[in-house]
């Protein structure tokens, strides 16, 4: 248990460090863009600062990359005055930090498996440089099936798009979407699950029967446990 705790803290620290480095790189990029656009427009720092409502000294610190706490709205205002538009988009780059509820959900799935089926957790997609991973992978003989586990469903369509992209990039033909059996999750599945029937054609009963018999479901499925 102690070893597992240390591993989790190390993984969390690595992710925080990666985020810190990414944030610093974004600040440097924005500072360089602001300076470049200002020079192209022929504006002095004093004139641009006055137009945005900040001090000349603050703008100087931003352009010199000495203002790492600059609010995002300030960057957006500076770039807007310079004829630019700040746009931000988040890309999947790894597996998110999970909680104990997530571990218990995977443990419930493990309890439904025949002895001949093994389950590995945190399985990388296997693409060089890609930090994404499946929450688990079921294996028996030469057959494999990835598992994506969710304790709380919010945007089911966004989740489906994320899984579909991982399937395409990882060249996977089927997946088991494991969901915690809660009242809220059941309500979400009732409301939006029909739209996913074509992508997840195997029924929960078919999936559980196969897993209990030592087989993997032959098609993708959504399983609430």
Image: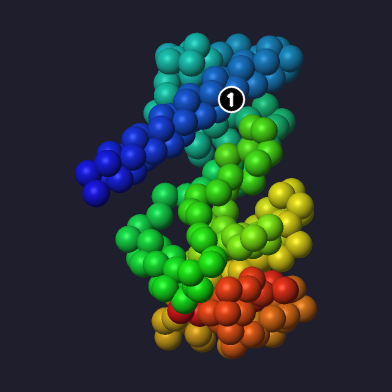
Q: From the top left corner, tell me how far across and down residue 194 is, in percent.
A: 69, 85
Q: In this view, does 121 lie above or below 79?
A: below
Local crowd at mark 1 within 10 Å, few (<14), some, or many (≥20)?
many
Quadrant of the rendered structure where residue 51 is?
A: top right
Q: Is residue 170 above or below residue 64?
A: below
**Total numbered labels placed on residues in the image:** 1
Q: From the top left corner, tell me how far across and down residue 13 is, in percent.
A: 35, 34
Quadrant of the rendered structure where residue 216 is?
A: bottom right
Picture residue at 73% right of the left edge, 57% below the top: 172
Helix, strand or loop for disc 1: helix
Q: Is residue 89 above or below residue 104?
A: above
Task: Tell me if I can see residue 179 in this picture.
Answer: no
- Tag 1 residue: 30
Picture residue at 39% right of the left edge, 67% below the top: 107
Picture residue at 51% right of the left edge, 73% below the top: 114
Q: From the top left corner, tell me how far across and down residue 17 is, in percent.
A: 41, 29
């Amino acid at each position: 248990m102690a070893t597992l705790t240390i591993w989790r803290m190390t993984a969390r620290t690595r992710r925080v460090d990666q985020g810190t480095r990414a944030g610093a790189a974004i600040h440097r990029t924005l500072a360089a863009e602001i300076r470049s656009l200002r020079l192209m427009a022929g504006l002095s720092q004093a004139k641009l600062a006055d137009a945005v409502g900040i001090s000349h000294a603050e703008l100087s610190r931003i352009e010199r990359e000495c203002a790492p706490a600059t609010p995002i709205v300030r960057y957006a205002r500076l770039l807007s005055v310079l004829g630019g538009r700040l746009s931000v988009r988040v890309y999947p780059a790894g597996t998110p930090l999970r909680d104990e509820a997530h571990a218990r959900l995977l443990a419930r799935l493990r309890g439904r498996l025949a002895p001949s089926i093994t389950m590995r957790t945190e399985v990388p997609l296997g693409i060089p440089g890609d930090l994404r991973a499946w929450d688990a992978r079921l294996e028996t003989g030469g057959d494999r099936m990835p598992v994506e586990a969710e304790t709380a469903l919010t945007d089911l369509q966004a989740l489906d798009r994320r899984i579909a992209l991982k399937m395409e990039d990882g060249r996977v033909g089927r997946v088991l979407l494991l969901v915690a059996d809660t009242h809220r999750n059941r309500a979400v599945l009732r409301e939006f699950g029909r739209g996913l029937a074509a992508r997840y054609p195997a029924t929960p009963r078919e999936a559980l029967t196969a897993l209990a018999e030592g087989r993997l479901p032959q098609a993708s499925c959504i399983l609430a446990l």
